[in-house]
Image (spheres, grey):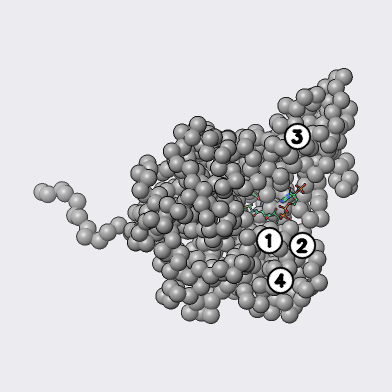
Amino acid sequence: MDTKPIQSSQPPVNANLFAALAAAFPADRRACAVETDTGLLYSWQDLLDATAMVANLLESLDLEPGARIAVQVEKSVEALILYLATLRAGLVYLPLNTAYQSAEMAYFIEDAQPAVVVCGRSNFGWISKMAFQAGTAHVFTLNDDRTGSLLDRAAQFSRSHTIAQRQADDLAAIIYTSGTTGRSKGAMLTHGNLLSNARVLQKYWGWRTPEQGGDVLIHALPIFHVHGLFVAIHGALINGSKMLWMAKFDPKAVLQAMPRATVFMGVPTLYVRMLTEPGLTRDAVRNMRLFISGSAPMLIETFNDWQQRTGHAILERYGMSETVMLTSNPCRTEDGKRMGGTVGKPLPGVQLRVQDDGGKAVSVGEIGGIQVKGPNVFKGYWNMPEKTVQEFTADGFFKTGDVGRMDDNGYVTIVGRSKDLIISGGYNVYPAEIEGYINNLPGVAESAVVGVPDTDFGEVGVAVVIAKPGATVEPAAILAKLKATLANFKIPKRCYVVPELPRNAMGKVQKNLLRNQYQSTQ
Ligand code: MCA
Ligand code: AMP
């Protein structure tokens, strides 16, 4: 008997995320896809042409499958095009916050071993040196004024390009997220992770296709983290929705754009800042359909104030770099009511459970560690197989490090974190990393960094430092040294030099006591 498998004449389905996004572009390719705050207009055809040219350039470099394209550039539509082109070429996108300084960049480049690095003109000198030393073959520039060697080179390539064939399990991006030990971990996300999440959110948040009247998204977040890069961009593109593109968040500019938009996404700080604008009225938001918040806890006061001023209940959702979006408050009434103070219910396809320290499920309403499973959960940490194993349970649930409870209607409330993490204005700051730098400064014996409440950023860091016997250390000098080394959002807002730190019987620093002591020292 002939046991040869039957060959199908059908080409395999392409699981490349870009293929799904491009398939959703509206039939009218001349329509505007992205409008910038400087008045530039990009059509859907422009996105297709430009991503083809950049993808052709990347493919001409003959990179290994799975090669990383590390990008530290200011927000621009060309940066968006580079992201999409990287997907299109089947390569792995690695975005880096523009606030990162040389020590941070050196770590990412050494760890990820990117084949290509793209940076702004003003950083080319030091970044290219660092990258070439680490074995990177190509360094391009991309500036926020549509210039740079990446675009110069891409201009020589064709606008025609066949989207690279990828499996759902192939890597699409690596997102670095800080670790409790102070060492950042690269979360490996696949085409399948990102596409499944984008499709679930498209339905759950009731995005309206152009045929259904269309949505218009105000995009005011940075594009080097999950919120701005994936949730916002995929949300708009997979739905053929136009984006009003803002290089930086400016509350007045967002308010001005609202009459021409329907959806806004922000971290709580953006809502807090918009609430200080007298122009935030029911009339200003008359055209808006949906306000979404996430990345950090939203105070119930902010939720209530927003509802009172605008008539809109903000939809709060919860996610992580490792998992993209996990839970969401309902958008459509048939899915339930939006409950302020909660992060809503597990999204369709996401299994979420709350367990005690002994690995047993807690009762409804009881507090425990949040664990998740689903097609959105990442493939593991780059180059850290042991760490990856540690973060999953034996039955395949990812341990989020968030502490919360679920009520009998399935709504999840996050009450804290078992990981020592500060979330400031939507950015994560790991005290262990900052303490490591402080402890290495001359004259410092030890330090503890804790998060305290802040009206603008939600939470900010405070450093408490012990000097070595006989040494004198100045708080201002410590902060100045940190500022010269670390990303600006990581710098503690205040620093105190004290004789000793409170410790428990085991000798461990009692950070809860420090939090209480320094919370009202603004
Ligand atoms: C700026 N500064 C900050 C922060 N941002 N300090 C603490 N926390 C911050 N987040 C400091 C700067 O160091 C500077 O200090 C001063 O504030 C002004 O800086 P500037 O750049 O002008 O600030 P800004 O433009 O007002 O920025 C604030 C911001 C920004 C708009 C809230 O931080 C932001 O865009 N945050 C969003 C972050 C985000 O997208 N997160 C999503 C992560 P100095 O004057 O002393 O130098 S994705 C995620 O978390 C998960 C997966 C999820 O669920 O979404
Ligand atoms: P990241 O490392 O940037 O992916 O941040 C993920 C973390 O942000 C989560 O583990 C949560 O601690 C936090 N987070 C995200 N969304 C929310 C939210 N809506 N409420 C409270 N915490 C959130």
Count of all numbered marks drawn on residues in the image: 4
Locate residue 226, reporting x and y percent. Answer: 58, 53
Which residue, given by chain and number where applicable, does mark 4 sit on?
Answer: 255
Q: Please give the label number shown on residue 249.
A: 1
Q: Is residue 502 visible?
A: no
Horizontally, residue 7 falls left or right of residue 183, namely left
Direction left: furthest residue: 1
Q: Are marks 2 and 1 in contact (CB under 8 Å)?
A: yes
Give SS at disc 3: helix
Direction top: furthest residue: 470
Locate residue 294, reporting x and y percent. Answer: 66, 58
Q: Residue at x 75, y 27 (%)?
A: 441
Residue type marked 3: Lys
Q: Please tell me which residue lies in front, 249 or 138.
A: 138
Q: Residue at x 84, y 35 (%)?
A: 475
Locate residue 398, reporting x and y percent. Answer: 56, 45
Query: Between tags 4 and 3, which lies in front?
Result: 3
Give SS at disc 1: loop
Marks 4/2: CA distance? 11 Å
Q: Earlier in the sequence, mark 3 or mark 1?
A: 1
Residue type marked 2: Arg
Give SS at disc 4: helix
Q: Earlier in the sequence, mark 4 or mark 2?
A: 4
Q: Within 8 Å of ligand 1, the CB of disc 2?
A: yes
Residue type marked 4: Leu
Residue type marked 1: Phe
Which residue, given by chain and number where applicable, does mark 2 sit on?
Answer: 273
Give SS at disc 2: helix
Which residue, given by chain and number where applicable, does mark 3 sit on?
Answer: 481
Q: Are marks 4 and 1 in contact (CB under 8 Å)?
A: no
Horizontally, residue 417 falls left or right of residue 24, namely right
